[in-house]
Image: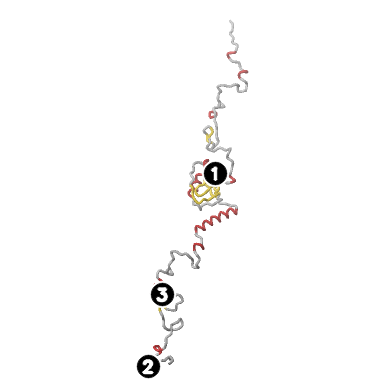
């Protein structure tokens, strides 16, 4: 006997369809039986229970929260290999600015009253404060101006003693390092100082830092208004020994009575 679908009626003639018709599974466009599942499953058409939803959402980042750490951006790019850090960009900027200055044939410049003030400033300066090619002008006279020819990765403090010692150190090695910076004499300031003497040198105790005035006593000479203890000629240039007669050789006489 073949299976047949039937509809039952009650005493008043109403169909009892909800109880007798085969009910299909529910879809997104039609009502029907609904099946539940406790674990989210890809491509599933079953309904997720509230408990299953809570379990799936536990320990997940909320839409208003901020991730503490991430390995990729929203597009899936690996952060460490896709983006540059600020410190890396700072180094690139320093290199680019140095290259730009050299290409344009110009450099920044700063000035100090003297070498001691310059040493103090460079010892305390950060490694990014000056760039290669920067000029350093010194207001004090008789000392060469300098320029920064290298920025080192580690600092080395320089102890100032005298201008002469600083210049001598540069002449010996071609540069000195002060803090992060190696400085050298500007090409326009390079002078052969072989035949020069330092300003601290003295003549008879008088420093060469200013004009030197010597008196007769400084060199053991007779003052212009002084009287010579011994002389070979008179003021007119006459040789004394051949011009004048000694008193002992003079002829004396007596009057006769």
Side of 48 relative to 175 (left or right): left
Q: Who is closer to the viewer here, 141 or 156?
A: 156
Q: Position of residue 112 (x, y in %)?
A: 52, 47
| Residue 127 percent coordinates (x, y) | 50, 52
Q: Regarding mark 3 in the picture, which secondary structure is present there?
A: loop
Residue 196, compared with residue 149, is above or below; it is above
Which numbered disc, 1 or 3, marks the residue closer to the eye?
3
Quarter of the picture containing the C terminus is: top right
Q: Are marks 3 and 2 in contact (CB under 8 Å)?
A: no
Asked if residue 215 lies left or right of residue 29, the reply is right
Mark 3 residue crowding within 10 angstroms, few (<14) / some (14–19) / many (20+): some
The residue that appears at 52% across and 41% down in the rendered structure is 165
Residue 208 spot, x, y in % from top left? 54, 36
Question: Mark 1 = which residue?
Answer: 173
Task: Tell me the residue that label 3 is attached to.
Answer: 39
What is the total number of numbered labels drawn onto the structure image?
3
* The N terminus sits in image quarter: bottom left
| Residue at x 41%, y 74% (from the top left corner) | 39
Mark closest to the chain's N terminus, 1 or 3: 3
Q: Are marks 1 and 3 in contact (CB under 8 Å)?
A: no
Q: Name the residue tied to disc 2.
A: 10
Classify mark 1: residues with Cα within 10 Å, few (<14), some (14-19) or many (20+): few
Mark 3 vs mark 2, CA separation in Å: 43 Å
Q: Regarding mark 2 in the picture, which secondary structure is present there?
A: loop
């Amino acid at each position: 006997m073949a299976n047949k679908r039937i509809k039952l009626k009650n005493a008043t003639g109403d169909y009892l369809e909800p109880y007798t018709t085969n009910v299909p599974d529910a879809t997104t466009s039609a009502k029907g039986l609904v099946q539940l599942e406790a674990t989210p499953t890809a491509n599933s058409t079953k309904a997720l229970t509230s408990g299953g939803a809570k379990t799936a959402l536990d320990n997940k980042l909320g839409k208003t929260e901020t991730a503490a750490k991430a390995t990729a951006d929203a597009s899936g790019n690996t952060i460490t290999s896709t983006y540059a850090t600020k410190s890396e960009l700072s180094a690139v900027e320093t290199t680019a600015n140095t290259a730009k200055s050299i290409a344009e044939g110009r450099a920044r410049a700063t000035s100090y009253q003297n070498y001691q003030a310059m040493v103090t400033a460079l010892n305390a300066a950060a490694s990014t404060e000056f760039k290669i090619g920067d000029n350093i002008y010194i207001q004090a006279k008789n000392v060469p101006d300098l320029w920064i020819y290298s920025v080192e990765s580690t600092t080395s403090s320089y102890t100032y003693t005298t201008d002469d010692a600083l210049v001598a150190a540069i002449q010996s090695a071609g540069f000195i390092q002060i803090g992060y910076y190696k400085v050298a004499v500007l090409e326009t300031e390079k002078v052969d100082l072989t035949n020069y003497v330092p300003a601290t040198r003295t003549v008879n105790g008088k420093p060469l830092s200013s004009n030197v005035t010597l008196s007769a006593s400084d060199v053991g000479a007779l003052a212009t208004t002084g009287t010579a203890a011994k002389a070979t000629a008179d003021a007119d240039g006459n040789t004394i020994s051949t011009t004048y007669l000694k008193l002992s050789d003079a002829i004396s006489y007596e009057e006769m009575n």
